[in-house]
Amino acid sequence: MTNPDPRPDSSRASDCPKRPGCPVFERIPARTSMLGAGMTIRRVLPSRQRRMIGAWCFLDHAGPLEYAAGQGIAVGPHPHIGLQTFSWMVEGRMRHSDSLGNNTWIEPGQVNLMTAGRGIAHAEESDPAEPGRVQLAQLWIALPDAVRDMAPDFANFTDLPVLTCDGLELTLLVGRYADQASPVPVHSPLIALDLYAGQAGRIRVELDSDFEHGVIVLEDEALIDDEPLKTGELVYLGQGRSELTVAVGQGGRVLIIGGEPFDEDILLWWNFVARTPEEIEQAASDWVSGRRFGAVEHAETPPLNMPDPGQSRIKRP
């Protein structure tokens, strides 16, 4: 996905309140925007209250939405640096194509992980000839300084660990849980769990107390430690929790993310994660000039217009 804001401001991780270092229950409402023909995006990270949860620095939830032929997701080629894009496909299918030559479909229950590193361009599109229904969560993971200039890469993961308990289905997207490990490679200690209720139920989720955590309801409503949470609402839980109780009705879905606090101060503007304004400006110049990122040969949607850095506020130290 991309940031559709025509005049995005940059955000620094250090701008938000300091991490509490203890359990909290901080509600973060979603900001909505449109992406494509009628596609509503709910964005909860970054926000004024919380820029990051662990190395997770961006969280969008799209859909669920039924669309006609010629509609759906149509995000043309656009660039990224300094991050990994993480796409969790809940419903529907979407084609990923990138400047490495990858051209593949992501199906329900699968994860796409694209490592931008020093620079990559990609596009994400529904099949324009077919109607459909789509729902997905896309997140960005900030790369630590030691690896953020690594070579770009892409992988699709079709076989993720799934645990069942009292009618609830827990899919391990990233990290380790119980005796299972996700095959999705990341460069910071992280966790991501999708909890789906085939029938109404209640579950106790074990947490790493050294991590900070957040929970977003993707479908229906949920009780998080007996506190109600609505669709699209994120709650930041802080650190120090060893467990979490989640209750959901039939058909409900909850996404739990967490990670070791990310101690590097990142600068995020449009689709770039960097450390300095000069890096952002160089990446923007390279994209406009056709350098660094390469062409996305298989995309059917025109490239995105990059916002003008001169018309946006890119924060400087």
Image (tube, helix red, strand yellow):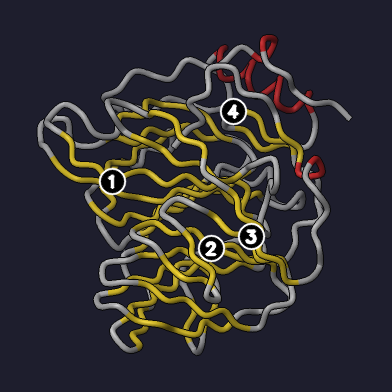
Work out how far the residue at label 3 is from the one at label 2, CA to CA, in angstroms.
Answer: 7 Å
Residues at marks 3 and 2 touching, judged by CB atoms closer than 8 Å: no
Q: Which residue is mark 3?
A: 236
**Label 3 with label 4: CB-CB less than 8 Å:** no
In what element is the residue under mark 3?
Answer: strand
Q: Nearer the viewer, residue 229 or 289?
A: 229
- The amino acid type of the residue labelled 1 equals Thr
Mark 1: few/some/many CA within 10 Å (<14, 14-19, 20+): some
Q: Earlier in the sequence, mark 3 or mark 4?
A: 3
Tell me if label 4 and label 2 are in contact, CB under 8 Å: no
Amino acid type of the residue that numbered disc 3 sits on in the rendered structure: Tyr
Badge 3 or badge 2: first in the primary sequence: 2
Count of marks overlaid on the render: 4
Quarter of the figure with residue 125: top left
> Mark 2 and mark 1 in contact (Cβ < 8 Å)?
no
Task: Kindly identify which numbered label has been placed on residue 153.
Answer: none
Residue that appears at 52% across and 35% down: 120
Q: Badge 4, how many Cα within 10 Å: few under 14, some, many 20+?
A: many
Q: Which x, y percent locates residue 102?
A: 35, 42
Q: Earlier in the sequence, mark 1 or mark 2?
A: 1
Q: CA distance from mark 1 to mark 2?
A: 30 Å
Query: Closer to the N terminus: mark 4 or mark 2?
Result: 2
Residue carrying label 2: 215
Residue on which disc 1 sits: 104
**Label 2 residue SS:** strand
Q: Identify the amino acid type marked 4.
A: Trp
Q: Nearer the viewer, mark 1 or mark 4?
A: 4
